[in-house]
Amino acid sequence: MSSSPSHTSDAAHGAAEGDDKIQAFQDFLAHHVMDSHHWELPFLDIHTPAFITVHGIMLLIGTAFLCLLFGVVYKRKDDVPRGMTNLLESFIIFVRDEISIANLGEEDGRKFTPFFCSMFFFVLMLNLMGLIPLFSTATSNLAVTAALSMITLGAIISMGIARHGALGFLKSFAPPGVPLAVLVILYPIEILGTFIKAFALTIRLFANMLAGHIVIFSILGMVLLFGALVALPAALLATAIYFLEIFVAFLQAYIFVLLSSMFIGASLHPEH
């Protein structure tokens, strides 16, 4: 027995409606996790020029905010910092003592503290901005994390050459006492390992920041698929993951700077 035309029409309409919901969900997810030239604000849609994207704008805003934070808000007028200055000082001292000096030694660690503090606060700012409504996560962009990693790679190579000379830097990839037959294989691997370190920094930060936002927006996007029935559970679960992402933002900034300090320290002190 063949189905009636009305039943066939209802089935086709239901399938089309389901496809529309899936497409809406995909568009919703892609818009919030991918970079673009379209920045949606409550009463204004901004279409950025061809030479900059939304993530590029986030980089500029983050830089401007950090300049404001440390140029205006941060005030060290007396021996005992207070308020926001005290909070920022606690992060600076932590980066100096637990990251920079711990991995580069007392002398080099103090010299590199401004570099690592700048990197830490910049990465942290970009991570946290992605958790603010209407903003976007620049560190979920592979190009951004690759650029940050290239800074670390440049420091590894340039500081190693500056400290040991070009020849000494190249010799540092050859562990002493290794037989020549093994060294022929090991030496290229050690050189390649320097670039793999930068690649690992790139992927680690990119993947962690992108994954968290995909999870949050996927949960919220379930409302588009299933309607008000899942709205409350989805909102509660997304809120819980949101607070977890705040912790992840700090953690990933810390890990990025920690690994960078370890890699640079190994370049300056290959004997260790």
Image (tube, rainbow, N blue to C red):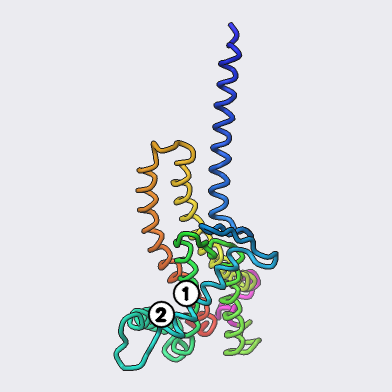
Which amino acid, mark 2?
Val
Give the secondary structure at mark 2: helix
Residue 63 got which mark? none
Q: Would you identify the image quadrant in which residue 69 lies?
A: bottom left
Residue situated in front as seen by the camera: 18 or 205 = 18
**Residue 177 pos. (x, y %):** 55, 79
User: Which quarter of the image is occupied by the N terminus?
Assistant: top right
Cα–Cα gap, marks 2 and 1: 9 Å
Is residue 170 a member of the stretch shown in magenta? no
Q: Residue at x 53, y 54 (%)?
A: 32
Give the secondary structure at mark 1: helix
Position of 112 with respect to 167 (left or right) is left
* Few, some or many residues within 10 Å of mark 2 (<14, 14–19, 20+): many
Residue situated in front as seen by the camera: 188 or 215 = 215
Judging by the rendered image, the residue that carries numbered circle 2 is 95
* Few, some or many residues within 10 Å of mark 1 (<14, 14–19, 20+): many
Q: Residue at x 41, y 80 (%)?
A: 95
| Earlier-in-chain disc, 2 versus 1 | 2
Judging by the rendered image, the residue that carries numbered circle 1 is 257
Q: Which residues are magenta?
A: 172-185
Tag 2 and tag 1, C-beta contact below 8 Å:
yes
Which amino acid, mark 1?
Val
**Residue 205 pos. (x, y %):** 51, 64
State the count of labels. Answer: 2
